[in-house]
Image: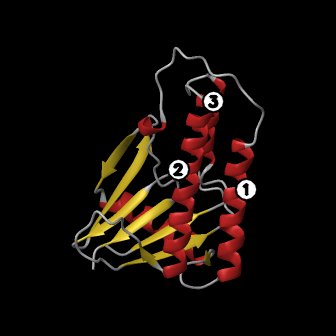
Amino acid sequence: MPCIELWNKESINSTLSQIQYCKDADIFKTRNDLEAVVDSFEKTLDHLGAASRKGTKIYTRRLRCHLSISLQMYINEVVIGSNTILAEVDETKISFIPYNVFSYMITKDVRFNESTFHAFKNLVSRSTLISGTGEKERNKFFRLLKEKVRDLKNSAHVTFPRSLQFSPQDCTFINQGFSVIFNE
């Protein structure tokens, strides 16, 4: 499904805060575990940067067929503060609204979705397209995100207790932007 994503420089703060919390709470077994998680997150940003450069979603080698799915990535200075996902499937609009940290409320309510899609389109109209174009803005944006990640990685040294059982394999990163997916 082709999609439009709306990001800003604050989009990754939630993930960075979660990593910082794990670090401060001594949840990582070793500094190497922390660095592996941060390195993995940096690779995620590299992947997003490459996808926005190409203007298509990029899938891993695990898929047996080649898919070329349109990606329109926009940046906006407005702090979105939401990981809302909007979808339009067979002319039915659906909203996925995050609540309780890890849960989503899903609605097909016509009035709510019309209002939400209208607000999203309004934000997009005031945003800068960085996928497939806008090389300077795209590079500047991803450089800023990666600097935030490096700052976390290079922050003060911490000690790691051996008693905790947490490793990088336990981490998953979720797109922190505002997405809308259209079915054509």
* Marking on residue 40: 2
First of labels 1, 3 by sequence position? 3
How many residues crowd mark 2 within 10 Å: few (<14), some (14–19), many (20+)? Answer: some
Coloring basis for residues: secondary structure
How many residues crowd mark 3 within 10 Å: few (<14), some (14–19), many (20+)? Answer: many
- Where is residue 163 shown, x and y percent of the image? 52, 14
First of labels 2, 3 by sequence position? 3
Amino acid residing under circle 2: Ser
Residue at image position (48%, 80%) is 55
Amino acid residing under circle 3: Lys
Q: Nearer the viewer, mark 1 or mark 2?
A: 2
First of labels 1, 2 by sequence position? 2
Relative to 7, 63 lies left or right: left
Separation of residues labelled 2 and 3 (CA atoms): 15 Å
Amino acid residing under circle 1: Glu
Relative to 139, 57 lies left or right: left
Residue denoted by label 1: 147
* Marking on residue 23: 3
Q: Secondary structure at mark 2?
A: helix
Relative to 38, 114 lies left or right: left
Q: Secondary structure at mark 1?
A: helix
Residue farthest toward the bottom in the current orientation of the protein: 133
Nearer the observer, 79 or 3: 3
